[in-house]
Amino acid sequence: MSETGKPISRIDGSMKVSGKALYSAEFNQPNMAYVFPVRATIAKGKIAAIDDTVAKKEPGVLAVISHLNAQKLKPMDMQAQMKAGAAFLGENLPPLQSNVVHYPGQFIAMVVAETYEQARTAAYKVKVRYTKEKAAVDLKAEIPNSKRPKMFMGEEAQVNEGKAAPLLAASAQKVDHKYSTPVEHHHPMEPHATVAVWDGKDRLTLYDATQGVGLTGAIAAYFLDLKPENVRVVAPFVGGGFGSKGLWLHTLIVAMAAKAVGRPAKLALTRQMMQTNVGHRAATVQRVALATDTNGKLSVMRHHTDTYNNLTQFFEPSGKQSLVLYKAPLREVTYNVAQLNRSTPTFMRAPGESPGTFALESAMDEMAFKMKIDPIEFRIRNHTTKDPMQGHDFSSEYLLDCYRIGAERFGWSARSIEPRQKRQGRYLVGYGMATATYPGGRSAASVKVVMDAKGKVTVSTASIDIGTGTYTVLAQTVADALGIPVDTIEVRIGDSSLPAAPLAGGSQTTASIHPAAVEACVLLRRDLAALAIADPDSRLSGQRLEEIDFAKGKLFVKSDDKKNDSYLNILSRSKRTELEACATTLPVSGAGLTVPSALCTPRETPAEQNSDIKQYAFHSFGAQFAEVWVDEDFGTIRVKRFTSVQDVGRIMNEKTARSQVIGGVIMGIGAALMEATDYDQRWGNPVTRTLADYHVPVHLDVPPIDVHFIGKNDPHISPIGARGIGEIGITGVSAAIANAVFNATGKRLRDLPLTPEKFYEV
């Protein structure tokens, strides 16, 4: 029976609950020093002077390092960085290289000391004098000064600009509203942390909380001017990331500190630093306009986003889903991007789609209500099986099934189109739904499989498990590809010295590394078969390779399974202590970040797969359903139950997949009801500085969440048929909740989070 798909528990779970799983901050070294950064207290300007006299006299202080005495790093050079695989940065600002301040909290110096407490105490005694400049701290005030970027991640940013206005003006059936989303922060449970260890002058090991050991290593090698093979990055366990880990340059600060004092060094960011130094989701102000004919068929869609960035070309791409969902003759997607003196925005779980589906799916609900059409029926009428921009069929698409199954499981038929029709005591009860979507990506990846003479199998790749279940699902894949039990397999990941794999982001890990794992197992089985065929003592002696199959740790002849030979016997007779195979599979479909180099011989890809990316569009889809109870006296909103139905291709492990969707839904509940980072409009610094201020859902905020998967293979994304799950779960959640609030109360809330005071502002 196949191991793939079974809801087996995580094979790394016992290590985590027993404390044996080591995270980056726990790789303590002998004679280790501690680093604590000094952060800027202004939003914009220059450092005029740094006085570290008092700090240097503090007990245990080994060094105070700033732009005045820091190691010189290789300067930014985008072409050279791209060649080195180091162009994908969180912010384009090599640390401690100049006296220019770009945002509050920017790292401008560091103290290195014998203990963490000594470093922190001394850091607060470094005196900095600034020359201040007028800072841009408010998005709405800076929109008149914003720019309209031409490109985003290699695609046109401004699509059909100006073409929607005539059609909207001529339409009698339309909605046109603004929706806003606040700044959100990732706040993974594990803070960012790095331990740097030098071996001589030119070999560096980094134990780092990163979503991509290969990327972090390439960045360090480039800026520190080291040979890539001389930088090793280790991250066997990562306590959450959500897009925030692996792109930031504090790793360089730790390496610089370790070199300066001649001993290993550690930096663990505080929760306050995670508000200013490792990215966030930028605030958006979105305007969505829809128009239909008299039958409820969309004639035009327009989605405009005002947002901001700083020290990066990245901005929140909130119009992405509006280029994918629904059938409309014309769609216009545009952006204004201001530059604020605020820490650099970055990718956060479902970048673009999370805030973008709130706006689009709220507008779809508003249009459906105006037309007096059930929201599901309205979406069905406008459903498309083709990518609206490219005209390609989707590689695998079961969105209509998501609507149907979700409605049945949720009990949608009990909903009234008219609001305020259902009560439970003093609570108004409402039902809402929304569509979920996220691209299906795949990148090049390498995997090595080693079988020893005792039957133990080790599978190795430089991929990362950020809590998604990579250890477990990879073991299941290899178990099936070799016909052996899961408990005989050891999975080694999170080490840049292993075969190369892409960043664990963009929901691409499963689709990328598992085809390589299967191909490595195919090569290993062929090598075992070759040994057996050439061995006169084997029952498979003289057989043709194509006549041999495998199961239960054996090779056998397809036409006569009594002619078999076990893997262990084959290895024993050939006097092999182990046998290994390594394979690299290239991305033949989907979009993704290709690893800089492959460590294995690439497997030949069938020609028909190579053509798939030119014939199909790769996306996942889903339907989100929420029931809310609203206390009309206090304006409080409770999500009482939630149903999520997802079409994400083949399900590799039902338990870990379900956990991913549950996590996404919970994060979506946070975005809908409570998450927001507020800034002091005078100084530009965040005032929600801890998890006491930045509210995230806790147990009492989370209702029963019903998750269902369509589970049908995508035949074009890869031979294994699986797309990513990590990001789609959050998309559409906030819209489903907001739409349910309208159904309950008749009040349309268009500004996240849906906090009680906004209930009375409408």
Image (tube, rainbow, N blue to C red):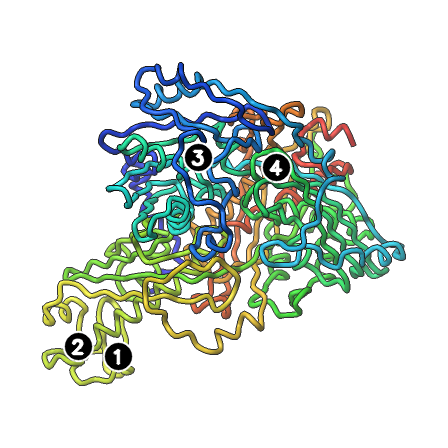
Side (left or right) of 682 relative to 370: left
- Tag on residue 189? 3
Residue displayed at 28% across by 45% down: 203
- Tag on residue 740? none
Q: Is residue 367 visible in this depiction of the protein?
A: yes
User: Considering only order in the chain, which callout, 2 or 4, is on the residue closer to the N terminus?
Assistant: 2
Question: Are circles 1 and 2 on residues that touch, CB within 8 Å?
Answer: yes
Classify 108 as above or below 539.
above
Which quadrant, please, contains the N terminus?
A: bottom left
User: Considering only order in the chain, which callout, 3 or 2, is on the residue closer to the N terminus?
Assistant: 3
Side (left or right) of 729 relative to 449: right
- Tag on residue 548? 1
Instruction: Give amino acid for label 2.
Output: Ala
Residue displayed at 21% across by 72% down: 528
- Residue that label 2 marks: 532
Instruction: Give amino acid for label 4.
Output: Val
- Residue that label 4 marks: 639
Classify 227 as above or below 341.
below
Residue 648 place in picture, x, y as percent? 52, 58
User: Considering only order in the chain, which callout, 2 or 1, is on the residue closer to the N terminus?
Assistant: 2
Residue 280 place in picture, x, y as percent? 55, 38
Question: Are circles 3 and 4 on residues that touch, CB within 8 Å?
Answer: no
